Image: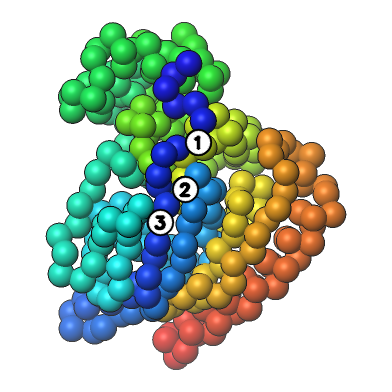
Amino acid sequence: MSGLEGRAAGGALRISHVGKVYDPAGARVAALESVSLDIAAGEFSVVVGPSGCGKTTLLNIIAGFDSPTTGEIAMDGRTLAAPGRRPAPGADRMVVFQTGALFPWKTVLWNVTCGPVLHQRLSRAAADARARELLARVGLAGAEDQYPAELSGGMKRRVEIVRALMNDPKVLLLDEPFRALDALTKGVMQECLLELYDMTRRTVFFITHDLEEAIFLADRLVIMTTRPGRVKKVLDVGLPRPRDYRVLSSARYLALKEEAFEAIHEEALKAFEAGERELA
């Protein structure tokens, strides 16, 4: 057993009236407005919405890379972010980015063990053992001594997710991690992520533009409005776990897709019309 099995202790997020205003060149740009959301420990929450609705801004505030203009974010009752409060990134929240961030001159094994070893959370022997187990779980047994340039896009994504889990986080933050993958690889990666989620039950905050992906993965689907981003609708997905591709043809999945598409399409039209006005 890796020590990652079972439901995580903690990782509940409370997002309370969060707003974010950017001020480039003196022009106030509201990215988020009064966003409130409670995410239970171990919940897989997926956020969707039109481009520019503040999804990544919200993720960055949770991660500690940015601070809100108004409101507060807390985890397990401890404040993570508030106006005027210095952001505090931590190993309890790990991020998997769109573009990837593997060290190209280091091996797969070094990439996934460097964090816990350098921060003395695990010994080298314990880190190597855990890394090899998790890599095997995602189909990468034997890839430990390869370099990122030798891996496919899907393999790199798996390495990045394993690296995040190696730090034993309470919350896993994923910023459109499968966006650049082809459709077949994306489908395999989604099932791989669900297998890891079923194994670890860490809290997941996942953002995407892909509605089908969102419904397939989520416990709850959070639909954002166009800018400034607000929570428009929250849908309880209710599909049984563990899941595989067969749920994509279920009546529940198709009903959720129709309801969510209607809400998102309305916001996409608003975003399009706003863009047209700005260009006029």
The reply to whether residue 212 is in sight is no
Is 279 located above or below residue 171 in the figure? below
Q: Residue 91: x percent and y percent?
A: 27, 39
State the mark number for residue 41: 2
Q: Residue at x 67, y 66 (%)?
A: 260
Can residue 55 be seen here? The reply is yes
Pick the residue in front: 203 or 279. 203
Picture mark count = 3
Residue 78 is situated, as x and y percent measured from the top left of the image, at 28, 55
Which one is earlier in the sequence, the residue at label 1 or at label 3? 1
Instruction: Give the CA distance from mark 2 to mark 1.
Output: 8 Å
For the residues labelled 3 and 2, the Cα–Cα distance comes to 7 Å
Secondary structure under the numbered disc 1 in the rendered image: loop
Q: Residues within 10 Å of mark 2 (few under 14, many from 20)?
A: many
Tag 3 residue? 13
* Left or right placement of residue 111 versus residue 175 in this view: left
Residue 199, compared with residue 41, is above or below; it is above
- Which residue is denoted by mark 1 in the rendering? 7
Q: What element carries label 3?
A: strand
Secondary structure category for the residue under label 2:
loop
Q: Residue at x 28, y 9 (%)?
A: 125
